[in-house]
Image (cartoon, rainbow, N blue to C red):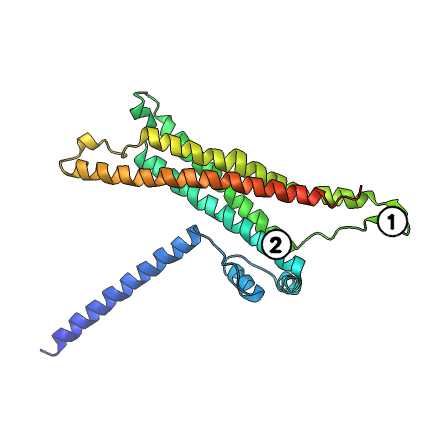
Amino acid sequence: MPTEPRLIESATSRRFAVTRDWIGRVTSLFHRLTFRIKRGATPAETLQEIGQRWTIDDKSRQMLLQYAATKPGAAFIDEKLQAINRAAFHRSAFVFNALTQFLFVDLAAQLTLSLPTLKALAVLANLVLALVAHLEMRKNFNALVAGPNKLPKRRRFLGLMVNPKYNRAVKKSSKPYARAAWKEKSLYRLGYFINAGTIFLGSQFIVPLERLIFPIGFITGKITGLFTTLVIIFDVWRGVRAGEDSRLAREREVAVYRNLNI
């Protein structure tokens, strides 16, 4: 029976190929959801990795490569990469919180309230914050591709008079830092702390545990408690980090104003 081992081997190979294909899809989806650009690589490698996710034309790529050879250019690109990675992390975190709110939190039931829309509002609020973070990530990418704005001359008429266009340009360049500081402090930090509080108060599986057959309800309750505890710790940690990121953005805003020609 020489054909039987071949049939078994062929079936095993097909199953292995299908499994490998599904693992590849899940891995690709995970990398998309947990978007992160590696720092510390060469400018060419960094731009190549960015080009795998977004489209960069040859003109912008060449400009960034030349600018990255200078110290201000390397600092500018690294700053934008940090902003992109931070916004991408917020996006993934709030999508994760939305799933947690949907599956493991029922604040209305815990507070004995009849508010069926409370869960929907919590999920929607997290998705809105994820959308804000996604738009912030795209904005930082566009700023990276556009390159730094060249400031006009500090003084005009042979250095005898102050150039008001210079100060206006400096003030305009500080606005992204002010917006980033406000979002980190007033949106993201508040969102993480509210998520931590609501998960702590309303932790409950989407199906009431008393309706599950023993010991499934007991096991599910233990797993749910452990999972929500980890999510609470994560949200508190990210809320503290968001406050720190807001402080750093304010410091960068102040540093920009130090360049004013007064």
Which quadrant: the N terminus? Answer: bottom left
Q: Position of residue 174 (x, y in %)?
A: 67, 43
Judge whether 213 appears above or below 255 on screen.
Answer: above
Residue occupying image coordinates x 32% and y 22% = 111
Q: Quadrant of residue 96?
A: top left
Q: Position of residue 228 (x, y in %)?
A: 32, 38
Q: Amino acid at mark 2?
A: Leu
Q: Is residue 244 left or right of residue 31?
A: right
Q: Position of residue 230 (x, y in %)?
A: 33, 41
For label 1, the crowd category at 10 Å Cα-Cα, with few meaning under 14, some 14 to 19 and many 20 or more, is: few
Q: Quadrant of residue 20?
A: bottom left
Q: Position of residue 74 (x, y in %)?
A: 62, 59
Q: Residue furthest left?
A: 1
Judge whether 216 appears above or below 67 on screen.
Answer: above
Residue occupying image coordinates x 90% and y 47% = 160
Residue occupying image coordinates x 81% and y 49% = 154
Which quadrant: the C terminus? Answer: top right
Q: Amino acid at mark 1?
A: Arg
Please name which of the two marks, 1 or 2, marks the residue nearer to the observer.
Answer: 1
Q: Calculate the distance from the C-alpha at mark 1 to the C-alpha at mark 2.
A: 30 Å
- Residue at disc 1, secondary structure: strand
Is residue 74 visible in this depiction of the protein? yes
Q: Which residue is mark 2?
A: 144
Q: Is residue 53 left or right of residue 22?
A: right
Q: Residue furthest bottom?
A: 2
Residue occupying image coordinates x 34% and y 36% = 102
Residue 156 numbered tag: 1
Judge whether 115 appears above or below 144 on screen.
Answer: above
